Image: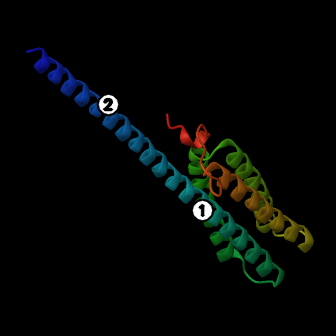
């Protein structure tokens, strides 16, 4: 009788151990899946936002160049405003998903883009060298945003235990 009880206790202990080990493994797998899903959304958000800034930058430059040639800029201004509206919407997603460094850099990108857009909206415009400098400063800040996004997504670094990217709460 005692051997049967010991056997039964052993089976129960093994079942409980197996249950807890499986539960822990499934919980870790779920956390990893959740983290991966958010990283995918973050990556998409960063790509879309940066693309929209480049689109607005190009639209502003085309508008300014058309104005210099004496062409009608009404249609180009409409394209520029549409690109700016898209960028504005995408910025909200970046604010929700991006880390602090990326969102602060995106704020600087916005300020520099707005300065260029003001030049494009103003019929008097700004000198060509000022516009060129504004456009280059946007591109430089976008490079900084890309670096911040890479850090946020832990791209190019091995994931270490205890690294903030590992914690999913």
- Give the color scheme: rainbow, by chain, secondary structure or one colour: rainbow
Marks 2 and 1: which is nearer the front? 2
Mark earlier in primary sequence (2, 1): 2
| Above-or-below relation of 169 to 12 | below
The quarter of the displayed image where residue 163 is located: top right
In the displayed orientation, state which residue is furthest to the top.
2
In the picture of the structure, the residue carrying the numbered disc 1 is: 47
Quick one: label 1, few (<14), some, or many (20+) residues within 10 Å?
A: some
* Residue placed most toward the observer, 151 or 141: 151
Q: Quadrant of residue 75?
A: bottom right
Residue drawn at (48%, 51%) of the image: 36
Residue on which the image places disc 2 = 20
How would you rate the neighbour count of disc 2 (Cα within 10 Å): few for under 14, some for 14-19, many for 20 or more? few
Residue 42 seen in the current view: yes
Q: Quadrant of residue 24?
A: top left
Q: Left or right: where does residue 96 sit relative to residue 20?
A: right
As drawn, 52 above or below 13: below
- In whole angstroms, how far apart are the C-alphas of marks 2 and 1? 40 Å
The answer to whether 5 is drawn above or below residue 50 in the figure is above
Q: What is the secondary structure assignment of the residue under circle 2?
A: helix
Horizontal and vertical percent position of residue 100:
68, 42
Query: Which residue: 72% across, 80% down?
Result: 72
Q: Depth check: 10 or 91 in front?
A: 10
CB atoms of marks 2 and 1 within 8 Å: no
Q: Position of residue 40 (x, y in %)?
A: 50, 55
For numbered disc 1, what is the local secondary structure? helix
Q: Is residue 125 visible?
A: no
Q: Position of residue 13 (x, y in %)?
A: 25, 24
Q: Quadrant of the N terminus?
A: top left
Picture residue at 39% right of the left edge, 43% below the top: 30
Q: Position of residue 124 (x, y in %)?
A: 86, 69
Up the image or down, 5 lies above or below 51; here it is above
């Amino acid at each position: 009788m005692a051997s049967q009880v010991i056997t039964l206790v052993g089976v129960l202990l093994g079942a409980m151990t197996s249950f807890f080990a499986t539960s822990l493994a499934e919980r870790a797998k779920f956390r990893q899946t959740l983290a991966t899903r958010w990283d995918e959304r973050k990556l998409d958000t960063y790509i879309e936002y940066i693309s929209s800034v480049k689109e607005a930058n190009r639209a502003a430059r085309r508008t300014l160049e058309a104005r210099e040639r004496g062409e009608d800029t009404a249609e180009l201004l409409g394209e520029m405003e549409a690109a700016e509206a898209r960028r504005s919407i995408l910025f909200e997603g970046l604010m929700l998903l991006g880390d602090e460094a990326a969102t602060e850099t995106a704020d600087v990108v916005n300020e520099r883009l707005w300065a260029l857009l003001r030049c494009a909206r103003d019929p008097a415009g700004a000198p060509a060298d000022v516009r060129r400098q504004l456009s280059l400063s946007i591109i430089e800040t976008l490079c900084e945003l890309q670096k911040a996004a890479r850090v946020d997504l832990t791209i190019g670094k091995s994931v270490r235990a205890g690294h903030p990217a590992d914690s999913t709460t």
